[in-house]
Image (cartoon, grey):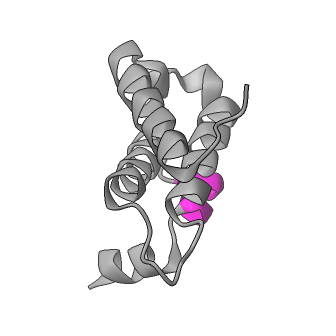
Amino acid sequence: MAPRNWEERIRIARTAMETIDSTRFMDLPNRSQERIFVIGALQRLAYHDADVGGVADIAQWCVTQWLRMLQQNADDLDALCGLSPSTRIRLLR
């Protein structure tokens, strides 16, 4: 059953983040494509309406996960591309 409203989608996303954090899924090196998919999906949800500014906690979780992937492999192009332009600007300051 698909979520009916925005608040329900956000609640489900937050529950997914908590579950992922409790499982060590993001530390599995052989699951990089799955990790990219999960982070990307949550990031799209967090920034679905850029004019509003996004959902801060979900957006921050995504940035943290991209940075963790880069920490594991500094040459990970997918992780570099996953960071939003504004995040890249903040990191370079």
Q: Position of residue 21 (x, y in %)?
A: 35, 25
18 vs 68, nearest the viewer: 18
Extreme residue in the left direction: 93
Q: Position of residue 56 (x, y in %)?
A: 33, 61
The picture quadrant where one finds residue 89 is bottom left
In the picture provided, is 8 more to the left or to the right than 18? right
6 vs 93, nearest the viewer: 6
Total number of numbered discs in the rendering: 0
The picture quadrant where one finds residue 24 is top left
In the picture provided, is 5 more to the left or to the right than 64? right
* Residue at position x 63%, y 42% in the image: 36
* Residue at position x 47%, y 47% in the image: 7
Q: Main secondary structure of the magenta part?
A: helix
**Range of residues picked out in magenta:** 75-82
84 vs 18, nearest the viewer: 18
Extreme residue in the top direction: 23
Q: Position of residue 59 (x, y in %)?
A: 41, 58
* Image quarter hosting the C terminus: bottom left
* Residue at position x 63%, y 24% in the image: 31
- Whether 24 is drawn above or below 43: the answer is above
The picture quadrant where one finds residue 68 is top left
Q: Position of residue 38 (x, y in %)?
A: 60, 38
In the picture provided, is 81 more to the left or to the right than 63? right
Q: Is residue 54 magenta?
A: no
Q: Is residue 81 magenta?
A: yes
* Residue at position x 34%, y 56% in the image: 60
* Image quarter hosting the N terminus: top right
- Whether 41 is drawn above or below 87: the answer is above
